[in-house]
Image (spheres, helix red, strand yellow):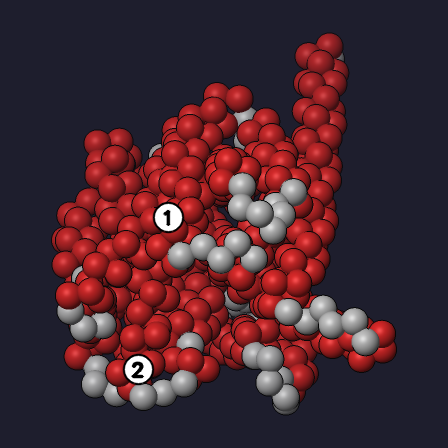
């Protein structure tokens, strides 16, 4: 296909291509949120412990996080649309295999393949959108993707609960099959990406294996509270050191060296990790607070937690439209301000339920994340450039997963730390404070302090980027004036 025909195809089918990636994104987010709801049912079905059944989610997270960079790099070399279509097909077949699983081990194997398929589509999905849409429309396209993430997250618990009320947990995975088939057909019809002029055959397999092993050790270490988990931390450090050595010597690196030197790209991703981590820490703690401190019914807690996802879905396209016209940073800083305000509201949650305050908290948290996510993604992809779109997309997806994982682990770790502090304090003073309610209040406040610190750090980095961009603009203007005078 000639370059002219490719441009014509992109112009005519860009919204259909966006709809294709949205179907795939909805399929992935719906699958994740439904699986979490089904964990207790699957544990009873297999007669295993909750620690064992958690591997259904953990194996998916490990495979997805560790393989996105590899598939992002492959997308830049063999064509992003090819990686995407293959990923959707693999995810669909693996979903059907999950439906057929009659024991835990076959289910875990199928979930690993499902994670590989999700890694392929997620690694290049954002890059495809960034490549197809011009800069002036990129924010709106990214905003539509944020809407899909929010809708998938909202639909998961309610759809999953409905399925489990009338059918076995197997049908949770069968739901992904029709979405996968539709996404595959749409991708085959409407997704195209320009192929590299000189595609590199060499794939950084050694670096990819080291990175995958390092990420796996990191996730297992962060998600494990058992004795011996420090060995996974040591293994992560050794594998990370080996990865750095290999990357320095190879002529075909996994990480794009040019992008790693791109200040705007790296700092944009740093802000994202800080924000994702703070957001998931808050969202992880709130259901426990509502259950333990306010003693609310499970159904009420589920409805209250949906407020944030709904607000996030609404905020995504609005922020995309605004950032397209006024710039990403003019949206990101107020969005992080909304996150800070939500944390301030959380500090005032007491032992007596205050629904108005909690609803305000959830609206601010969801709106802050929704308004932040779209311009941040758009700015990162712009900084990377179209020639590195697939790698940048995989890099962003990997950071998002790791941010969520680190935030969840930190949030759970703080609770265990609070439990130990309370026990030691009780042993020294004789004052018993280790009730569930008191423990959670202590851990909740500690988590909020950490979240405030993370968001403030993100705002500081954002302000630095704004100042740097202004200096660059002024310098360019002076240079152009000098050239014109000459």
Q: Nearer the viewer, residue 62 or 84?
A: 62
Q: Nearer the viewer, residue 472 or 326?
A: 326
Residue 204: horizontal and vertical position, in percent?
48, 71
**Total number of numbered labels?**
2
Quick check: can you spot residue 429? yes
Q: Quadrant of residue 218?
A: bottom right
Q: Earlier in the sequence, mark 1 or mark 2?
A: 2
Q: Which residue appears at 39% of the width and 34% of the height? A: 314
Vertical relation: 406 (above or below) 109 = above
Q: Which residue appears at 26% of the width and 31% of the height? A: 11
**Which residue in the protein does label 2 denote?**
44
Mark 1–mark 2 Cα distance, whole angstroms, equals 25 Å
Q: Which residue appears at 60% of the width and 68% of the height? A: 436
Q: Which residue appears at 44% of the width and 74% of the height? A: 58
Residue 196: horizontal and vertical position, in percent?
37, 52
Vertical relation: 177 (above or below) 239 = above
Identity of the residue furthest to the right in this view: 428
Residue 190: horizontal and vertical position, in percent?
19, 45
Vertical relation: 47 (above or below) 96 = below
**Which residue in the protein does label 1 denote?**
303
Quick check: can you spot residue 272? no
Residue 145: horizontal and vertical position, in percent?
36, 42
Q: Are marks 1 and 2 in contact (CB under 8 Å)?
A: no
Q: Quadrant of the image for the C terminus?
A: top right
How many residues crowd mark 1 within 10 Å: few (<14), some (14–19), many (20+)? few
Q: Nearer the viewer, residue 221 or 268?
A: 221
How many residues crowd mark 2 within 10 Å: few (<14), some (14–19), many (20+)? few
- Would residue 419 be found to the left or right of residue 102 on screen? right
Vertical relation: 409 (above or below) 228 = above
Q: Nearer the viewer, residue 13 or 397?
A: 397
Q: Quadrant of residue 241?
A: bottom right
């Amino acid at each position: 296909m000639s370059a002219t025909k490719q441009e014509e195809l992109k112009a005519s089918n860009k919204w259909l291509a966006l709809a294709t990636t949205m179907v795939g994104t909805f399929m992935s987010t719906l699958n994740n949120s439904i699986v979490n709801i089904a964990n207790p049912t699957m544990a009873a079905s297999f007669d295993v412990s909750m620690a064992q059944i958690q591997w259904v989610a953990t194996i998916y997270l490990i495979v997805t996080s560790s393989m996105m960079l590899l598939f992002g790099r492959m997308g830049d070399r063999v064509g992003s649309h090819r990686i995407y279509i293959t990923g959707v097909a693999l995810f669909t077949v693996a979903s059907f295999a999950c439906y057929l699983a009659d024991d835990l081990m076959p289910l875990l194997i199928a979930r690993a393949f499902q994670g590989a398929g999700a890694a392929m589509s997620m690694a290049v999905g954002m890059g495809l959108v960034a490549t197809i849409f011009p800069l002036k429309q990129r924010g709106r396209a990214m905003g539509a993707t944020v809407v899909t993430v929010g809708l998938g997250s909202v639909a998961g618990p309610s759809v999953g609960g409905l399925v489990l009320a009338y059918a076995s947990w197997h049908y949770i995975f069968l739901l992904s099959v029709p979405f996968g088939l539709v996404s595959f057909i749409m991708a085959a019809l409407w997704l195209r990406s320009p192929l590299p002029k000189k595609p590199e055959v060499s794939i950084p397999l050694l670096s990819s294996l080291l990175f995958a092993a390092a990420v796996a050790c990191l996730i297992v270490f962060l998600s494990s509270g058992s004795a011996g988990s420090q060995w996974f931390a040591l293994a992560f450090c050794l594998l990370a050191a080996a990865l750095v050595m290999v990357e320095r010597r190879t002529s075909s690196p996994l990480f794009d060296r040019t992008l790693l030197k791109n200040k705007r790209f790296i700092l944009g991703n740093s802000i994202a990790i800080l924000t994702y981590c703070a957001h998931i820490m808050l969202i992880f703690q709130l259901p426990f607070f509502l259950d333990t401190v306010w003693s609310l019914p499970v159904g009420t807690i589920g409805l209250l937690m949906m407020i944030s996802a709904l607000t996030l879905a609404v905020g995504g396209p609005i922020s995309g439209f605004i950032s397209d016209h006024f710039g990403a940073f003019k949206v990101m800083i107020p969005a992080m301000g909304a996150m800070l305000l939500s944390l301030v509201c959380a500090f005032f949650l007491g032992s007596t339920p205050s629904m108005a305050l909690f609803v305000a908290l959830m609206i601010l948290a969801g709106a802050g994340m929704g308004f932040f996510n779209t311009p941040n993604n758009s700015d990162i992809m712009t900084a990377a450039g179209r020639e590195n779109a697939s790698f940048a997309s995989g890099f962003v997806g990997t950071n998002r997963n790791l941010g969520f994982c680190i935030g969840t682990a930190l949030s759970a770790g703080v609770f265990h730390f609070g439990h130990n502090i309370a026990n030691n304090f009780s042993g020294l003073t004789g004052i018993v404070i280790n009730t569930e309610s008191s423990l959670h209040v202590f851990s909740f406040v500690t988590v909020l302090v950490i979240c405030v610190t993370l968001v403030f750090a993100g705002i500081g980095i954002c302000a630095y980027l704004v100042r740097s961009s202004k200096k660059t603009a002024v310098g360019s203007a002076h240079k152009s004036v000098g050239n014109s005078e000459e």
